[in-house]
Image: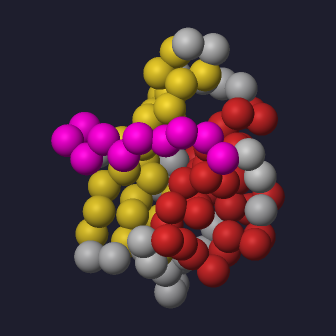
Amino acid sequence: MEQMEIKDNTFARQFETTFNGELVSVEYSFQEKKIFLTRINGTENEAFVTELLKNIMEIAYERKLKVVPVFPKVAAFMRKHPTYRDLLPPGIRI
């Protein structure tokens, strides 16, 4: 997996990176030890979004967070990549 540079902008509550010189962000909110991924802004490039989400899942592992895929593209990503389903909190099905 390609490691991309991702900034956690805690003030704006979003992960940020760039693609073709443009800002791409994944908005989030926290509740206890869960991160709710609520929106993706900046690109429709599926391959790039997939790599970005893989990197964010690794951040969730490192921080021992559960991931709640609120945004439909994030839920679809988790359905396509079952290796990350252990990040789902108990009771959350996709």
* Spot occupied by residue 92 in the image (x, y as percentages of width and height): 53, 76
- The residue depicted at 47 percent of the width and 21 percent of the height is 23
Task: Decide: is 63 above or below 23.
Answer: below
Please name whichever residue, 22 or 31, is drawn nearer the observer in this view of the structure. 22
| Residue 11 sits inside the magenta stretch | yes
Q: Would residue 10 be visible to someone looking at this image?
A: yes
Which residue, as the protein is rendered here, is positioned at the far bottom?
A: 90
- The residue depicted at 30 percent of the width and 41 percent of the height is 9
- The residue depicted at 68 percent of the width and 70 percent of the height is 84
Task: Decide: is 6 above or below 46.
Answer: below
Q: Is residue 46 left or right of residue 92?
A: right
Please name whichever residue, 74 or 52, is drawn nearer the observer in this view of the structure. 52
Q: Magenta residues?
A: 3-12
| Residue 19 sits inside the magenta stretch | no
Q: Is residue 27 left or right of residue 2?
A: left
Please name whichever residue, 91 or 88, is drawn nearer the observer in this view of the structure. 88
* Spot occupied by residue 12 in the image (x, y as percentages of width and height): 25, 38
* Spot occupied by residue 75 in the image (x, y as percentages of width and height): 62, 56
Which residue, as the protein is rendered here, is positioned at the far top?
A: 21
